[in-house]
Every structure is written in structure tokens, then in C-alpha cells.
Amino acid sequence: MERLRPLNDFIFKKLFGEPESKENLRAFLNALLYNNIGNIREIEIIKDKELTTDEIINKTGIIDVLAKIEDGTRINIEVQLTDQKNMDKRTLFYWSRIYNRGIIKGEDYSNLNKVITINILDFNFIDLDKFHTEFTLRESEHNDYKLTDVLEIHFIEMPKFKKLSNKDLENDRLQRWLMFLRNDISDSELEELIDMDNDIKKAEERLEYLSSDPQTMEIYWERERALYERANLISTGEHNEKVSTILRSHKLGFTVEQIAQIVELKEDQVIDILSKNNSVHKN
């Protein structure tokens, strides 16, 4: 039986965002956040608006994981498989929405608790050579001075982790979890992870259980189709935008070499697009 893709956001929610799977979430967060907030002992899954099956299938609902730990900190995890070119603004918008929920009208602002946002991305986003980045509010010249600790944003970029040559699975819990989340993990690699980490063994057992549930599988495949269609739509939009840029640049007299650099394509690809649009290319 084919292993379910853990980064399908519907399956990720089932693995980490339901009351019966909160120990999976606690173990994952301890691997990611231990150096920042210490060991998480108590965790509560926060049930947001219940998504209907239609919203899940038609990709209109945001399937994220929201939890609260013992000190009142709320943690939100979202999986993004396609680059919609708005990850920075989108992240701040959803962080602020969760932060605002932490206070009732008329209460003192001091009652607002910290919100940690975690974005797991299946594309490269941050222009730094590291797969895990963390952002807080710090003074621009004195980086050791933090204005407040209420904002903490993490990005985990799976393609960068995949390319990491010196993985240390034996000593790094987070790396073990990211290996577990990979869709292309081999059977032997998975067996090694399970032998190495009992928390991952429990998560894999949960994944196998989900694969035996007909209703879960039906929604999973529909969600896979919806995610594929969205990725294809974004790809088509990007292609059309590049074609428009190529044609405009050609009319303005740019050479094929210059246009290729602008749109980040090979010169023969630019020539092919120009010829298909009945344009004469210039060398």
C-alpha cells in the first residue's frame, strides 16, 4: 500500500491537529522549539471553525493546526506546498488574526499572549542557505535587543532540508521529524527512523491507521486533486506572465539574451515563445 503523503495538509491535520494525535504534535514541537521555550508538557488542540468536506475538497478552507501550551502561548502550523508569492504578507496576516483573538474587548493589552507561527513549505522562500529560519522583533542595529517576544515566526523549507548533505538524524530530533514528513522516504530510511525514535513510530502508526479509513482516504485523494489543480493553476499563471514579459520586452527592442536573463529562462525557450507568438526575435 502506498504511504500517505504527510504534507497533504488534510493528512497533516489528522496527524497533528486532532485531540487524539496531540502527543504527535507535542513531540514535533519539542523537537522544533525546545531551545526557545523549553520542554512542552501540556498541550491543548484548539478547534477552529470546522471545515466541511466541500471546503476541504474545493480548497476554499485553510487547513492548519492551532494549539495552546501551558503558559498560554498559541502555536499555529500551516503547510504550504505551492509558492503563491505572498508567503510573507500571508504569514503576518494570519499571525495577527490569532494574536487578536487572545484578548476580549475591554481587557488590558498585557493579557495578550505570545503567538508562534510555523510554516512548513515545499518550496524555497527565504534567501538564506538554511532550511530552518526564525524571525522575531529586534532592533535593526542591536540585534541582541528584542522589542518583545510575542511574535515568533518559523519557516521550514523542505527542498533545502532534502538537499542537506550532512544530516544528523541520530542527534537532531527535528531532522528526524522532517525525514518522516518527506513523501520520498524509502522503506529502509523509515524503518531506521522508527527504530531511532519512538515518537515517530507512534506517528507512523497513526498514518497507517488513517490509510485504512475509507472516508479519510476519499477526502485525501480529493484534496490531492485540489492541491494539484491549484499548483497547476499557479504554474500556468506564472507561465502566462513570463510570456507577456517576453513579448513586451521584445517590442521594446531587448535582445533574446537580455530577455532570457529577465525572465530566467534559456535563450532557446525565449526564441520558441517568440516564434509561437509570431514574433521575430532579435539577437
Image (cartoon, grey):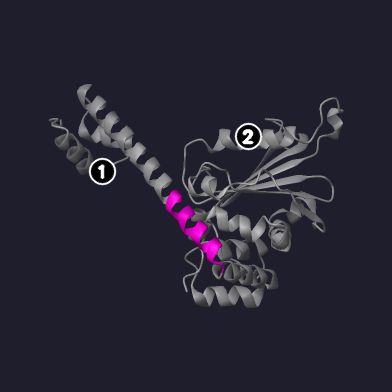
- Does residue 197 show up? yes
User: SS class of the residue under badge 1?
Assistant: loop
What residue range appears in magenta? 213-227
Residue 8 point in image, percent of width and height: 52, 56
Q: What residue type is labelled 2?
A: Leu
- The residue at 18%/40% (across/down) is 272
Quarter of the image with the C terminus is top left
Q: Which residue is more in the foreground, 122 or 280?
A: 122
How crowded pointer 2 is (Cα within 10 Å; few <14, some 14-19, many 20+) is rated as few
Circle 1 residue: 266
Residue 64 point in image, percent of width and height: 62, 48
**161 over 135 or under it: above or below:** below
- Does residue 27 show up? no
**32 over 58 or under it: above or below:** below
* Foreground disc of the pair 1, 2: 2
Tag 1 and tag 2, C-beta contact below 8 Å: no
Q: Seen from this angle, which residue lies furthest top?
A: 252
Magenta stretch, main secondary structure, is helix
Q: In this view, does 128 lie to the left or right of 153?
A: left
User: SS class of the residue under badge 2?
Assistant: helix
Q: Which amino acid does label 1 sit on?
A: Lys
* Residue 55: image tag: none
- The residue at 31%/39% (across/down) is 239
* Residue 92: image tag: 2
